[in-house]
Amino acid sequence: MSKVKRKNNATRGGLSTLLGVRVGWLLFVAAFLGSMAVALLVQLVLLPYFLPQLHAGHGMLVGGDSAGMHATAAALAERIRSEGWAVWELRPAGNAPTGIAAAVYVFVTPEPYMLAPLNALVHAAGGLAIYLIAFGISRHRLASVAAAMPFLLFPSAASWYAQIHKDGIFALGMLLCALGWMQAFRRDFWLVGVPRYAALLLPLAAGLFLIWLVRPHIMVLMQAVGLVTTVFGLGVVLVWWRKGVLGGHRALLAAFVFLAIPALMVLAKPSDYRVESWKGDVVARESVMRYMPSACLLERGDYASVDRLPITVAAMRDFFISGYRNAKSNMDPDFIPGTVCNLIGYLPRALQIGFLAPFPSAWLSDGSIAASTMMRRVISFEMLAVYAGLLLLPLALWDYRRKPEFWFVLGFFTLLMVIHVYLVPNLGTLHRMRYAFLTAVVGIAISAGVRHISIRRVDREGQEAAA
């Protein structure tokens, strides 16, 4: 490609990116205002006047963690006023949203509705991140707006952005990681001038910080995800170099960046008591391993280093089961990933649960409490949209098949979703933790359909004008 042609392409790409970012900011403002309005409506009107049986007071939902977080935050704010900021904690009882709420309550009225702007900001930023991810893949503004709609509009998300919770911050952190990492898989990132490292490093650093803030133990998983991403990225760089797309020095630079990211992540050591507890052996439990293969080449006890992964996963899974022993939404509570073969044998089931659960048979059943029953009804409508959106995924696979950034995003979200299925058997908790991953995949699939329809309409209009 000549320098003039490359410069013209870069100019057109820059203008397209500028227009796309402007549309993204308009989407962000609309999402912020809409989310704040919904949060205030839920807290001040819907729960106290229309659903009093689900109201725990102060606009908080019965059966969740938000009511306890609010009470702890209000008490801590009162202590700060009387004793000073020395008594403030980032994670009272292990919850960073409680510490953040306490800091806000010190300056304003200690009521959860004062947090509505902050929660709306986080939720809108998550929608903007999905928009930018989809725009980086499709280069189509309308399709990218459509991609953000499932994340922004699914009503179950109000159970955290209209409450006090960590899931919105966690979702934003994961989406920022995907947005930043995705830049390194775009060929033009390395071809046009000096690579714009801020577009990669700032979202990734911000995303990892938010994950560390609310779920520091997940940093252990992010290190593993970083290693997988690096292997994939080095393979892409090698292909580019062999095809002559990247020169030697640029290929080396790209390889260095891919290697440096997981190395830096290792330095951010997680500080969470659960990390230490998961290093131990699995708590002995009487259960049946449905998915245990009849024979395994790597039996437990043969290799200590190989045993570490399934033992850690089993301990983490046991931790979550112990908190929801009698929950009706537990999925496969009798599955224990005791060996590598057991982990691999469960993979098809994990993909099924990650993308498709809750299944239709559970949509009309009752939950353990009234709030979870209501949530099942809400999620049933969301799953209909998910199923419809996933029907468009083959179109996205075909249209974006030559884009490494698409395969990274799809693999990144799928891997994280499957990991959480292994770790979290309770579907209510899993739905909140996988929300960003699932809605992002569905959104990108929908974006491919919208892009396809838009292109065909433009082509048809062009043909009619020519005729």
Image (spheres, rainbow, N blue to C red):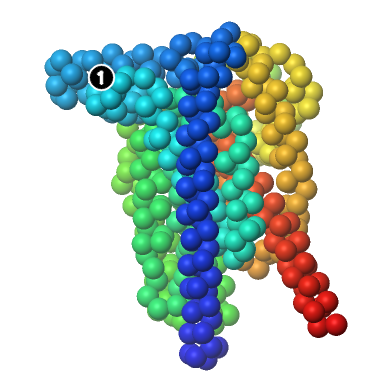
| Residue 287 position by quadrant | top right
Please indicate, yes or no, whether residue 54 appears anywhere in the rendered image: no
Q: Secondary structure at mark 1?
A: helix
Q: Residue at x 47, y 34 (%)?
A: 36
Seen from the viewer's position, the closer of residues 354 and 26 is 26
Question: Could you tell me which residue is drawn at 41 percent across and 24 percent down?
Answer: 113
Q: Quadrant of the C terminus?
A: bottom right
Q: Nearer the viewer, residue 232 or 382?
A: 382
Q: Is residue 130 left or right of residue 331?
A: left
Answer left or right for 462 relative to 42. right
Pick out the residue farthest to the top: 53
Residue under numbered circle 1 = 77
Frontmost residue, 413 versus 446: 446
Instruction: Check the image and report above or below for 270 versus 204.
Output: above
Q: Residue at x 44, y 43 (%)?
A: 173
- Image coordinates of residue 326 in percent, x first then y, are 61, 10
Q: Position of residue 311 (x, y in %)?
A: 52, 29
Q: Which residue is at a point 37% across and 57% down the rendered structure image? A: 201
Which residue in the rendered view is the most extreme toward the right?
467
**Is residue 146 in sight in this rendering?**
yes
Relative to residue 85, is residue 134 drawn left or right?
A: right
Q: Nearer the viewer, residue 449 or 173?
A: 449
**How far across and down, in percent of the image, does residue 292 sit?**
69, 29
Image quadrant in which you'd find residue 244: bottom right
Q: Position of residue 32 (x, y in %)?
A: 47, 42
Residue type at mark 1 is Ala
